[in-house]
Image: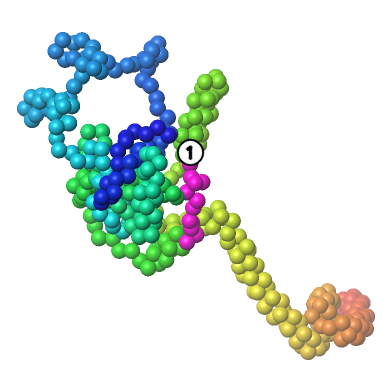
Amino acid sequence: MRSIWNGAISFGLVSIPIKLVNATENHSIHFRQIHLTDGGRIRYRKVCELDEEEVSGGEIGKAYEDADGTMIPITDEDLAQLPLPTAKTIEIVAFVPADEIDPLQMDAAYYLSANGVPAAKPYTLLREALKRSNKVAVAKYALRGRERLGMLRVVDDVIAMHGLLWPDEIRAPEGVAPDSDVTVRDAELDLADALMDTLGEVDMDSLHDDYREAVEELIAAKASGEAVQPSESKDSGGGKVIDLIAALESSVRAAKKSRGEGEGEAESEEDMADVHPIKKKTQQKSTQQKSTPQKSTPKSTGTKKSTASTPKKATQKKTTSKSTSSASSSKGSSSANSANSAKKQTSSGSRSTTKKTAAPRKRASA
């Protein structure tokens, strides 16, 4: 990797020659501006406002614009004469616990590489001292014409430096928090904790930029002349007033489903809910069926009395008594009932015929 700055780490009386290397890189896709009519590229040219002529980089200098618009030229020689002890030195000023550094101050990150063989021993000494103390080093350094604040820490076997913003560069969060007082219930906190536990941890190396990949696919498709199919955008539900409890419960279920958890538990709970009531009902029905044969006897006698007038009803009640009584008692009672009903049916039939024949005789005598 190419170094962007050469200097030394000032560690008390120890000086460690180092090279500064970028620890991060930007993978964003950059676009050019073009003329929509003919596709020509739009370029920015540096033109002097006074003579309206384009100037090269060697003709351009620095100046400070005063409040009244006056330009005060500042040359590189002027800046070089300023007392700047950190111009070529990363000066360590303190060692503090890492949690004392506000993450809001974090800026660009760099790797510090030992510059030459003599730098290996003091470099390793500083690295191991940082490891054993579990602390980070706060340092000052100068880069690109200004003094900066930095934090040194160990990453694997390398000393890394994070650029830090100065404390007065951090804005106070005034007017950012909600204006009204909001009360959070314990049930909502419990669901939020459950969602946090369900989501769990993540392998940071598995995260990637989905949007950048989509842009790369779009560029490849347009370059090859393929038709670009619009992708369906998911509704994030922004701007909707929702039930917080319901949203948290749905989020927990969705998180469990995405991780393949909770499916077996849900099935077992459904089985328990379906099976137990059915068993209780079948037990009640079985007990009722066992107790009904004792009451079947008086019902059968009632059917005997009613067979003279309505033989069809007697057969219907006889079939119901068969279904409720046991096998042994139903056979005996059904045979007795059938014999008695047959006798009554013949006797009633003979009586009805005699009555029918007697009626014409009375009319004839009359």
Q: Which residues are magenta?
A: 197-208
The residue at which mark 1 appears reads as: 210
Residue 211, compared with residue 327, is above or below; it is: above
187 relative to 106, above or below: below
Query: Furthest-front residue in view?
Result: 118
Seen at 37% across and 43% down, the residue is 118
Q: Quadrant of the N terminus?
A: top left
Q: Residue 158: image x %, image y %?
A: 41, 47
Colouring chosen for the image of the structure: rainbow
Is 207 within the magenta?
yes
Q: Quadrant of residue 95?
A: bottom left
Front residue of 78 and 360: 78
Seen in the picture, residue 99 relative to 91 is either above or below; the reply is below
> Is 198 covered by the magenta stretch?
yes
| One can see residue 340 in this view | no
Q: Residue furthest left?
A: 68
Residue 361 locus on image (x, y percent):
91, 78
Q: Is residue 6 above or below residue 227?
A: below
Residue at image point 23% right, 54% down: 179
Q: Quadrant of residue 94?
A: bottom left
Amino acid type at mark 1: Asp
Left or right side of 270 for 343:
right
The answer, for residue 174, to whether it is visible in the render is yes
Q: Position of residue 268 (x, y in %)?
A: 63, 67
Judged left or right of residue 214, residue 267 is right
Residue 18, percent from left and from top: 34, 40
Give 217 or 281, whichever is nearer the viewer: 217
Residue at 29% from the left image edge and 45% from the top image edge: 15
Q: Residue at x 48, y 56 (%)?
A: 201
Q: Secondary structure at mark 1?
A: helix
Q: Quadrant of the C terminus?
A: bottom right
